[in-house]
Amino acid sequence: MIKAFADWLVFDVMAFRAETHLGEAINFFVYDTIKILFLIYLISVLMGAVNVYFPTERVREFLTTRKLFGAQYLLAALFGAVTPFCTCSSVPLFIGFVRGGIPLGVTFAFLITSPLVNEIAVAMFLGAFGVKATLIYALSGIFLGTFGGFLLGKMNLERLFAAWVLQSNPEGTQSANGGSAKKLPFRKIAAKIFRDAHATTVGILPYVLAGIAVGAGVHGFVPAGFFENLLQCGGAWSVPVAVLAAVPMYANAAAIVPVIQVFVAKGIPLGTAIAFMMATVGLSLPEAVLLKKVMTWRLIGIFFSVVSAFIIGLGYLFNALL
């Protein structure tokens, strides 16, 4: 329905031509803006309800006082794998976890894995490349989230977040006596949840628009075959080149699978193609613009560097195994 509305608005009302680069870019911008803002608002409402009714202080206490031997990172990565969100949709959940006091390494494990692996992408990958490649792709995405979150969690990065993110939600979202929020009338709680969701959405709106604009420009104006030619010329450096080339892109995992299938059909090694896919959905420039609302550029650089190193290593490993 959103796609049909975007097509009608851009091609019928605004009279842009679908076959032009400008028309394609504007259509991408309108469609993704509506879709992502709707998802951000919806997820912010859900996280507001979770913060009110779910005892996140108990989860925080459990994660920080028990010896889980790294299982907390794996659980967060698995949760990210079963949530069908793109990067921009995962950020509000990430913010909610941080504000709820969940350890940063655990929240990073979710943020890394959530856009990389989901059931739709896995199903499409299975149909395109078979069982072995799909298992390697899915398990490596979970591995990346688990160990990436563990490493980032050991770096003491709290000081590099925006101050408002680390402030716990006021007015009873997490009460010391464990029950004051639940005693409030639902009408008042619902009103506050919707106000907070609106404030979150409006607060990150400029970053969302800027990120989508970058993705729309790449989507509409990068010539067809540009990335295939670039990766084919990369030689032994094809995996790092694939990761660097993917950063300006923006797409979810399900949308990029057909592109990867074309790459492989043109002779690009599957490991290089998967590295490109992972970097596209997990390390895009639009994501960096959006994360700037909650992180310093230094933290964004650390996050991108760690995840890039893991993706490059996995790309070479895939090329050796597949």
Image (cartoon, grey):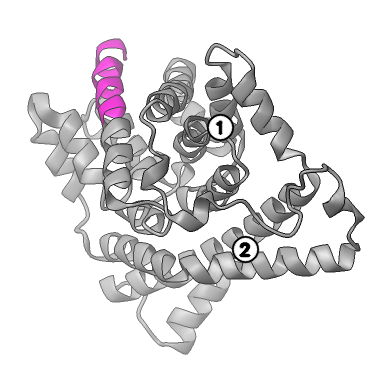
**Disc 1 residue crowd, few under 14, some 14–19, many 20+, Cα 10 Å:** many
Q: Main secondary structure of the magenta part?
A: helix
Q: Which residue corresponds to mark 2?
A: 41
> Neighbour class for label 2 at 10 Å: few (<14), some, many (≥20)?
many
Examine the image and state in which quarter residue 62 appears: top right
Q: Is residue 120 left or right of residue 61?
A: left
Point 48% across, 39% down: residue: 111
The percent coordinates of residue 220 (x first, y second) are 29, 65
**Magenta-highlighted residues:** 309-322
Tell me if residue 251 comes above or below residue 14 in the rendering: above
Q: Nearer the viewer, residue 230 or 289?
A: 289
Taking the magenta stretch, the answer to whether it contains residue 231 is no
Quarter location, residue 152: top left
The picture places residue 258, in percent across and down from the top left corner, at 40, 42
Can residue 262 be seen from the camera position used here? no
Q: Which residue is mark 1?
A: 81
Please report the residue visible at 30 percent of the width from the left and 21 percent of the height from the top: 314
| Above-or-below relation of 60 to 10 | above
Give x and y (percent) for residue 228. 19, 42
Which of the pair 306/245 is nearer the observer?
306
Magenta stretch holds residue 310: yes
